[in-house]
Image: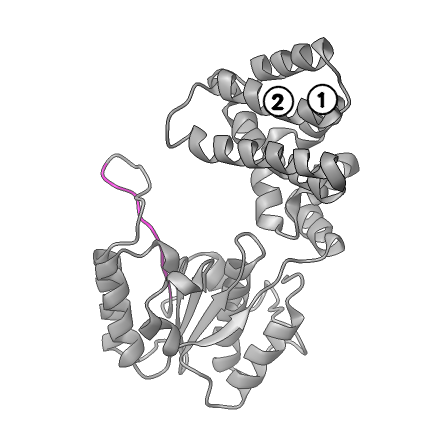
Amino acid sequence: MLIGHAEQATAFRAAFLSGRPHHAWLLAGPPGVGKATFAAAAATWALATSAGPPVGDDSFDVPSTHPISALVDAGSHMDLRSLRRTADDKGKLRTVIRVEEVRQLQPLFRNRPALSDWRVVIVDSADEMNTNAANALLKNLEEPPAGTLFLVVSHSPGRLLPTIRSRCRTLRFQPLSDTEVAIVLQTARPELPASEIAALVAVAEGAPGRALQLAEAGVEGLTRDMDALAIARGGEGTARALGLARTLAGKTAAVRYSAFLDLAPAYIARAAAARSGPRGARAVLLWERANDLAAGAVPLALEPQAVAFELATLVAGLAD
């Protein structure tokens, strides 16, 4: 079930049911707000609708018992492909989508769709294509095979080739409401307690994908730790920062450490937005330092405990 994005769903459904939908759609918006989920739902609906009477009323909801839905869920629908990063020989996910992955789509285009008049290609995400892959995809967009829909996900459409953008109809996506984020979390992770869901909603900033990534990190506990740091003064703040940093060191704490790199700058940013005058200016400086440190921690292979301690100390700086 698609949560939110009703306006985008209405626009796509109307275009498809008109009989002459645009062949390529650019799904543009911030990371984690549900663009890939929308693409999967739209693809399933379009394939089901083109194989028979229109499915659903005003949404993309296709019953799980529908034969097309069953094929999609099983990953065996012959007219649906996803273009994304693949694993290398060691099983590690590549950093880019290569031209080889685009070329693997070509056999799909040489024949008519197997189960209806349409086939769908989801590109998730176009931002990850290298130059050769982007040019190869552009060729398909410029000379689209008959009966093909391209659903192109992008977090930063301004960085795509202008010619790719010009071949697509753009649907822009915005962050979801807190209520919608909570529904996504309750659906995806029904075992989470209400307090943890509330903590995740508070840090999601309208992006349920972000919240789901943080769900394994114990966000509620980390938020409590930062709340305590933000009112601790002097030696107490230093002691709390050191204690928290120690819990974030080591391989077993990797998930929580990664979450803390994301959460600490955002926590300080929210504090800065709520303040004014000299206190607000100081909070902005703390955020700038925290943001720079967190952004460089992984690329520069900085020692986790040292980074966590410095970030925690910056959070404690809010108490001054």
Report if residue 68 is visible in the image: no
Give the answer, above or below, for where 197 lies relative to 317. Answer: below
The magenta span reads: 81-89
User: Crowdedness of circle 2 by 10 Å Cα count: few (<14), some, many (20+)?
Assistant: many
Give the residue pinned by disc 2.
312
Give the residue pinned by disc 1.
229
Q: Residue at the spot x=36%, y=82% of the render?
A: 147
Q: Residue at the spot x=35%, y=76% of the render?
A: 114
Pick the residue in front: 11 or 154.
Answer: 154
**What's the distance in space between the residues labelled 1 and 2, CA to CA?**
7 Å
Dominant secondary-structure state across the stretch colored magenta: loop
Quadrant for the C terminus in the image: top right
320 sits to left or right of 245: right
198 within the magenta span: no
Secondary structure beneath label 1: helix
Report if residue 24 is visible in the image: yes
Q: What amino acid does circle 2 point to?
A: Ala
84 within the magenta span: yes
Is the Cβ of the residue at disc 1 closer than 8 Å to that at disc 2? yes
Where residue 79 sits in the image (x, y, percent)? 37, 70
Q: Residue at the spot x=63%, y=68% of the render?
A: 61
107 sits to left or right of 280: left
Pick the residue in front: 36 or 210.
Answer: 210
135 sits to left or right of 219: left
Q: Quadrant of residue 308?
A: top right
Which numbered marker is on residue 220? Answer: none
Quadrant for the N terminus in the image: bottom right
Q: What amino acid does circle 1 point to?
A: Leu
Where residue 316 sits in the image (x, y, percent)? 68, 22
225 sits to left or right of 263: right
User: Crowdedness of circle 1 by 10 Å Cα count: few (<14), some, many (20+)?
Assistant: many
Give the answer, above or below, for where 197 lies relative to 108. Answer: above
